Image (cartoon, helix red, strand yellow):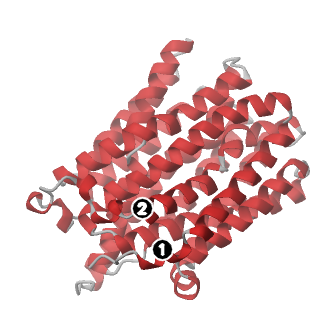
Amino acid sequence: MANPLSKIELNWTSIGVSLLFAGYFLGFGLFLPYFPLYLEALSFSPVEIALFVSLPNIIKIVATPVTTSLSDRAGRRRHSLAFYGVICALCFFSLVVLDGYWSIFAVVVIVSICHAPMQPLADAYAFEAVKVYGSDYGFMRSWGSVAFIVATLFGGWYLSVFSPISLQAFTALGFLVAALVALKLPGMPSEKKEHNQQAPWRAPALRNWPIHGFLLAVGLLLGSLAALYSFGSIYWLANGLSDGTVGILWSVGVVAEILVFMKGRVLLERMGPLMLVMVGGASAVLRWMLFPHATDVTLAVIVQLLHGANFGMVHLGMTSYLAEVVEGKYLGTVQGAAQTYIGLILGVAAIGTGWLYTYDPAVTFYAMAVMSVVGMALLALIWKPLQLVPRAA
């Protein structure tokens, strides 16, 4: 049960977490859609671009479980977030002046290691605030999506005037903001070291096989975003859409995502976390079947509106379900495990999209629809076992 807080204390907690998400997604909103264009500006090939884009997701496989479990055991989520944010900021600042293949490769590896735990640790902190104080996760997370929109709109305008290379400095500023905010967040019960003597990977939830099946299914559904992340902007630009329009299209997707998060409590009450994931999966199938034909603004807007369900519902359903079955002190570890599954599948899929895009761009997106179908089928197979997993106190 949530602890009774004064209105001021509750609002301050919500504001702090909202600012944390906002800072993180300011940086991420400039990195995700526009980093491939930075690589293209350096004359990298489609296969090389796919490799660089896939690196963070491949490195997540090892980096996320290690870094999140260390943070949980040390009881230092806020300090870990600050440290990782500062390192990411320094790395993106360096990309403004670097141009060699191997130097950029090394920086991307460092960024990948430090970026990997930031979202799961932020989600874990936010859901602990939900459990302890009764905060609204959807409301807090929606401000990250608002910041993502601001970032994508700014990035689209910036690239119509300036180089993708200098944009990396603004990406760095977003992560620096997240680091500074993390240091100012209020403490949580999980930060008490005496609560964290047991190894986080011994969390009871991770000994339930349906949890791993669930994370694999979600990994397939969110991993289907690989083609969008690697070649969405490039595909639209190649089909005659302008830089500014591409920025608006990314923002349209996030607006739909915001609406889902703002209505998160209502959706969860009416549908439950698992059904929310399933609906998001069905939307993913439709989205990727339509995407190759979205070469005009109208249809491109439609496929981007589906992002609200494709990503928003799947993410909200996944994080909410895990918060139901995992104790607060293990949330960072289990959210990290989720990112490991997602990162593995995103990484493999991103590499595959490089080859597929070279062969036929349309086939690249159809392959993502197939991945989504497989994810939905797996979720349906383990539906009953997931409902039987014990709920955390």
Relative side of 197 to 302, left or right: left
Q: What residue is drawn where x is 31% and y is 48%?
A: 68
Question: Looking at the picture, which amino acid does disc 2 mark?
Answer: Trp
Q: What residue is drawn where x is 53% and y is 55%?
A: 216
Q: What quarter of the picture does the C terminus occupy?
A: bottom left
Asked if the residues shown at circle 1 and circle 2 are in contact, with their CB atoms under 8 angstroms apart, the answer is yes
Question: Looking at the picture, which amino acid does disc 1 mark?
Answer: Pro
Instruction: Classify 10 Å Cα crowding around label 1: few (below 14), some (14-19), many (20 and above).
Output: some
Relative side of 304 to 63, left or right: right
Q: Give percent across and percent down for residue 62.
A: 39, 38
Q: Give percent across and percent down for residue 39.
A: 65, 25
**What kind of element bears circle 2?**
helix
Residue tagged 1: 385
Ranked by sequence position, the earlier of labels 1 and 2 is: 2
Q: What quarter of the picture does the N terminus occupy?
A: bottom left
| Res. 312 in view | yes
Quarter of the image where one finds residue 347: top right
**What kind of element bears circle 1?**
helix
Closer-to-camera residue (178/52) = 52
Cα separation, mark 1 vs mark 2, equals 9 Å
Relative side of 149 to 123, left or right: right
Residue tagged 2: 209
Closer-to-camera residue (152/296) = 296
289 in relation to 155, above or below: below
Relative side of 15 to 33, left or right: left
Number of the label disc, if any, that sits on residue 129:
none
Quarter of the image where one finds residue 306: bottom right
